[in-house]
Image: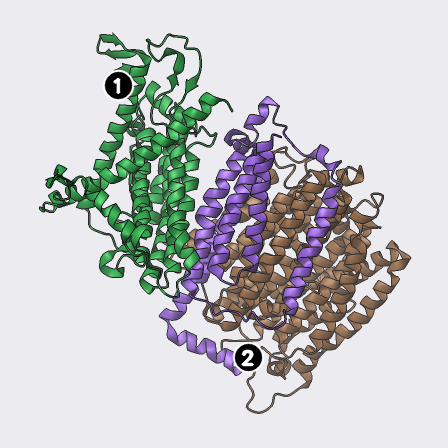
Amino acid sequence: MDMILLVSTLIKIAFILVLILTFNVVLLWVERRLAAMIQDRIGPVRAGIPIFGYNLALKGLVQPVADAIKSLWKEDFVPPNADKFLHAMAPLVAVIPVIVAFAVIPFGSSLYLNHAFEVLPPEPTGRVIPLQVATMNFGILFVFAMGGTGVVGSAIAGYSSNNKFSLVGGLRAAGQMVSYEVALGLSLVGCFMLYNTLLIEDMVRWQIENVWGIFLQPIAFILFLTGSTAEMKRVPFDVPEAEAEIVGGFVLEYSGMKFAIFKMGEYFELVLASAVIVVLFLGGHHLPGLTDRGIDFLGFAQPLWHGAVVAIHLGVFLVKLVLVLWLQFMIRWTIPRFRYDQIMKLSWRYMLPLALLNIFVTGVVIMAL
Amino acid sequence: MSIAAISFFFVCGAVAIASALITVTQNNPIRAAFSLLAHIIALAGLFIGLQGHFLAVIQLIIYAGVVVVLFIFTIMYIGPVPKPESAGRPSFAKLFSIAGMVVVTGAVTYAALGYSPALKGLNTCPEAVAECGQFGGVEAFSAALFRGGVVPFELISILLTVAVVGAIMVARGRLIYREKPRRKKQELSIENNR
Amino acid sequence: MSPWLALSPLLVVGIGSLTVMMVDAFSNKKDDLSILSSAILIAAAAIAGSLWFGGLPPQTPEILAPYLAVDAMSQFFNITICGGAALCAMLAGGYLREHDLERGDFYSMLMLCAFGAMVLSSATDLVSVFIGLETMSLGVYCLVAFRRGSARAIEGAIKYFLLGSFAAAILLFGSALLYGATGHTDLLGIGQTIRNGNAELGLALVAMSMLVVGLAFKVSAVPFHMWTPDAYEGAITPATAFMSVVVKAAAFAVMLRVLITCFGDPLSAGAASGWPPIIAVVAVVTMIYGNIAAIYQSNIKRMLAYSSIAHAGYILIGVVAAFRVQNTAVSAVLYYLMAYTVSNVLAFGSLIVMGTRGKEAVTFDDLAGAGKRHPMAALPFIIGMLSLMGFPPTAGFFGKYYVFNAALQADSGMHWLVIIAVIASAIGAFYYLRVIVYLFMKDPETGAPQAVAMKSGYVVTALVLSAYFVLEMGITPSNYLKMALAAAAGLV
């Protein structure tokens, strides 16, 4: 293992960790503010940085930091008769796989180190650094594998808390997530057939060369959006923690940092699902009119340095990510919670047959063309 | 094999064995399921070491993501289990199963120690050969599944049909009896007559 | 030959079961599902027969070749299994209606089980062996649990399910070890590797004993028989009949294939082909235990369950003999299975006919005097019992005769096996004749429940058919033996 590979990999890992943690902080604030606006409230605006007796409020942007500090200092309460080991393991089991899953997400185009400060020649040479932590030959399946492992966390959290509400929450979470995993996995099979690969970077390349996936697989997009929302247990699929009936479900008996880890895991999942949507359906880092060698838009051509193009690509990816996250927030705060039977019915009666139909139609069309 | 690969193998193998032992000896069912999860992840690691990448991912998706969750679901659904008496002398069944375990492990180990001629028949893939990069990949796997093994693949669809129909059959039977309590009474009277 | 044609019996049964399911789901009139399913099964049997007699392909289509055999033996078992399943479907047609259990899924599940049994009996690869075994077993577990309201059905189903899953796991472990020992999953390849001396014999020995355990469970040989009486008693009678004939036939088919094709070479010697002594011991224990335990039963179904254990013991003698005189012994086993199929359907069918709703014959006491009250209904019972006992002009007699004969021819060391078997069948005569004694020579105690015969065209048809075959196989056994010999030749 040579030095450049090691260093670049470490930098990429650090970048992803910083990215998702920053997103976590910002998203928390954005979500609370957005919710407040939708509900005609004001939301958190006061928490700020005290400088020389003056409160630098920044519209409450530091509120999540205050929350985090509060979580750290709170008592870490473990209910009596709870299974202490599993109670402590559950948040980790829930959150670690999600972070690991980011390894296969390409967040930009490949960087040719030799050509960073010149226009990319037709035959680029030298070392390439893909903006992706790991290329594995099962690509997108890795995300599913990790997502699937994470399911255990919430189920175990529900069991180990020694609380009836938690138990019900854990049961609901397990049932719901297993059900939606089926529809979620099948919804993407149409995309695999279309792109003819499982590698995410090849999927992005296919979309750059042809057309964004959302235009060819709109049903898959909708199914995946719905399914991933259910998989994340977010509103309108949040029956596992429905505050009004089971008081928070499987997170009921968690406090302090463990609770914060659960909540962080939820946002990590949100970012992960949005990133998957971006790379699978929205062309990843692709911006129409921007090629590897510069701007080429409606006859207007302007060569750019390769390094600049890669930076723009990275920015494009992040902008798309933010847009999808915005969409997720809007869904979160507009639709009321479903009943549990409605959730099950939606998965097994509508989404699963629709996904199968999508696969069938895609197959027929591909065979016919 | 490089040192990294060998140490990876030993770490995964040790975790797999330890978690398997915990799974079968643990009294608390949910902890047993949890260590089963650890076992499955370690097994996936072993598969990766054997170039079976696709199999490793499938292992994680199906077993870790679905099967273990359903185990845990069932354990939670049934509810807390009274603790089996741990004191006292070990039961006959326990001794018997331990003896069986030792015998089988010993026999397999003994037989596998002199393992040479059979290796010729196996499709082993040394890492140096170029085509072996695809050995455990998606293409190789699906070619084996859909070209060579299409017959068993289709037979499995019938197996799944049996499972689905059977589950509905057993579950619906209860509903029918509940809807018509009169029938149940007569049913019982037949049994009680005996 | 195209693979579709070669697979046609399987396809007919598989598609037929889905058809039955759809008819059940979308039709208001559900009375005729019994006719429909037995017609489909008989059609499949007829197709298998015409495939066989119309000329089998010289070689199996390439895509099927490693997994499913299309040879005389597989067609023989297709006919036996489909015929047995069709008779059971007819029995169910009468039984379910009489006892107000009429639900269409019983028939589709029965046919799916028959599908699994057919796959199992023609499997030539450990993969398809396991798939066939699971398809059949899962279906049978559900058939046992069909009467959800009854505690006994649930008890039987749970016992069967747990033990059966355990046995399947052992079988699967054995298959994995066998793959490790030889590098093959197809039975022929395994056999060749062992014969060439390329296999790891120690590992193959462990694998072989695990496979024997898994298969012995399915044929309910002692000491893997614990589930049998409970499952037989808990299941509704047509399902019991199905379990005792179809499941047993398929399990013996796969046992013959695995043992003879994989481990059949006497020259490879020693360890890996050490199954004959194991099976011989199992056979002795099975015969003795089955027959003696059957004497102590007061419940007729439990008695028949132990009788089926005992019969498994007799058939195992034939399996042992197949090690030396392959053709004779295998044909004897095939003949025995066919005879056992019709005889057992006859026995269970007569038990069904001996009961209306609420007035079933469950114990021997219920049968007291029933022969006098319903002589026509008692007649098939007599024939069935005599055949199971092995009385001369019936199928059962020649079944036993051929099997014992094969054992005598095989090896002088097997004489003691035959002697024990004859003694065991003499013990068996006691409880079979007891049924007849109760039917005709006992009077019911006053106030005790009496069995009342039912009237059902379906059941009568099934009884007439099986009684016909029981008698014909007993009067002109050579025709059927020829068939069995031709089928046995198909086994390499």
Residue B112: give its label: none
Which chain is depicted brown?
A: C
Residue A288: give its label: 1
For the C terminus of chain A, the image quarter is top left
Determine which residue is flagged by label 2: C452
The three-letter code of the residue at mark 2 reads Val
| Residue sticking out furthest to the front | A52
Q: Colour of chain B?
A: purple
Q: Estimate the x, y position of residue A324 in percent, counting from the top left.
A: 25, 34
Q: Is residue B90 above or below residue C449?
A: above
Q: Residue at x 63, y 57 (%)?
A: C167
Q: Is residue C134 left or right of residue A157?
A: right
Which chain is depicted green?
A: A
Q: Is residue A241 left or right of residue B120?
A: left
**How dense is the environment of label 1, judged by Cα within 10 Å: few (below 14), some, or many (20 and up)?**
few
The three-letter code of the residue at mark 1 reads Pro
**Local SS, label 2:** loop
